[in-house]
Amino acid sequence: MNAKRKDMIATVIIDLIVAIVVGILFFLLAYILIKGLPHVSWSFLTGATDSFDGSGGIGVQLFNSFYLLVLTMLISIPISLGAGIYLAEYAKDNWRTSLIRSAIEVLSSLPSVVVGLFGFLLFVVKFKIGFSVISGAIALTFFNLPLLTRNIEESLSAVPRSQREAGFSLGLSKWKTEVGIILPVALPGIVTGVVLSAGRVFGEAAALIYTAGQSAPVTNFADWNPMDAASPLNPFRPAETLAVHIWKMNTEGLASNAAALSAAASAVLIIAVLLFNLGARVLGSYLYRRVTASK
Amino acid sequence: MLKQYSFDKTAVQTFDAQTSLALKTEDLQVFYGTNHAMHDANLAFPKNQITALIGASGSGKSTYLRSLNRMNDTIATVTGKIWYHGVDINEPNVNIYEIRRHIGMVFQRPNPFAKSIRENITYALRANGVKNKAELSERIEKSLRGAALWDEVKDSLDKSALSLSGGQQQRLCIARSIAMAPDVLLLDEPCSALDPISTVKVEETLLELQKQYTIIIVTHNMQQAARISSQCAFFHLGHVMEYTPTGTMFSNPQIPVTQDYISGSFG
């Protein structure tokens, strides 16, 4: 067999493998969307769920998912930004740093259901917070922190050393160089990572079942005082999210059309996650153009 | 097989008390871990002249240069004294940020910030408290003119610095350094990534700049050293072997190792 022929066969095999991967993805997407989309309507997206059989809309769950996402990000972005900057710029190459790194790796490989149970025992039971948005957000932070920290560290490390030297050679302090020069260059990568992790958080169910709870009490969307029990912004109310709702409908949904309802909810979830991914790309390249002043 | 040269036989010039010096090192040694990269460098740099540091790769010339404004602080141990305006700036308690504002540096590869041309120059100025708009734009123009870049970019100051050519980027880096109004400008092979035309432009810029600044330049290019420098130091395996006026070094090298290096029969 000559080299040209071998090369052709290898190319065909590689193309085939890629086609399989892409094919599976499109099959899944098409299946979920075709099964679910016909049942999606405005009243489904905004309506309340019947607390007995789970029939009705997913308005509250959809809101809960976004609210939980925002809270999770509010907690996890500052922490992981600090940790990422520390690891990329300040940490010396010694045993302590490698201990931190392995700790982060272990944390990122913890099964989310274990994180959920930990959150349940610590926040819900021990601290007596109960099933609540805040318990869920903290559990999701544990789940999110290692990935986000890694992403931020990698984005920062990808900025060439010569940029730091340029800053130092002008008499800029390490902090000034970091914040004014390195961070803007790394920002598109960081934002992309944040939005992608938002998609993961948005679709997470296992960590939330025992923390944010499985019930979505009807909330009063006219009441925006976070202290009120019925307010959607109250962080201490139980909050079933969309992903948990799908899981529940499939395991214990009593409604006659439970299958259709969960298919519709799945379609909505998938579309939201796809939008996050798309948003990550658009936002990332937009920011890159903005900070580098390139057209 | 590399020829063996004695490190004892050196020819390093000193200057009399009348010559005003910008910078002077005494027994400067650099260690990377256990690797002794620079041995007892005793060099003095006269004001408003260009001094070239030449030598083969690994001879320690860049290591030496980077020690002068403490850029080696985090990666190497530097011992000995660096005299600048009567102060030993190699002392641990010296404010290195202050030092680097007086002793600027331009690197081998152009490294403009991923910002607009304007911001490349103003960022460090602002960080150092220059906020006045009129003063900022004056400094932009002055430094870009100094680096012979003004005419090429004056209409596009808000364009990304990354859109400039390599030669323009390097001149922007020079402009960025001189905008800080330093005393001494250190250049680490500033033309090695540039084409011949850009190289000529940078060289012309440097010749112009020596009226105001003291310039120390590391170069691999001996013609370049001969073209622009007044003093020339030859480094070999971490030792300063010869330091003489450039004319002397290229026409009448004092010791065999320099002679061999310059004539190309090295090693």
Image (tube, coloured by chain):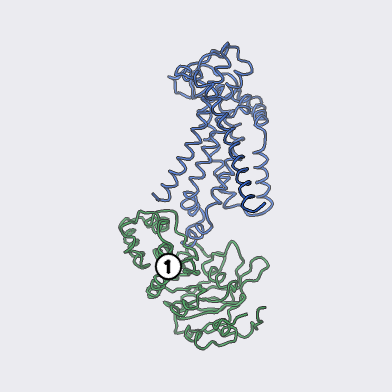
Amino acid tagged 1: Pro
Residue B1: x and y, percent? 67, 78
Q: Is residue B47 visible?
A: yes
Q: Residue at x 66, y 65 (%)?
A: B33
In the image: residue A5, left or right of residue B182: right
Colour of chain A in the rendered structure image = blue
Q: How many marks?
A: 1
Q: Is residue B234 above or below residue A186?
A: below
Q: Residue at x 54, y 87 (%)?
A: B253
What is the crowding at mark 1: few (fewer than 14 residues within 10 Å), some, or many (at least 20)? Answer: some
Residue A154: x and y, percent? 57, 48
Q: Closest to the observer: A44 or A150?
A: A44
Q: Closest to the observer: A16 or A31?
A: A16
Residue occupied by mark 1: B182
Q: Is residue B115 above or below residue B204?
A: above
Q: Is residue B187 above or below residue A24?
A: below
State which quadrant residue B230 falls in. bottom left
Chain for colour green? B
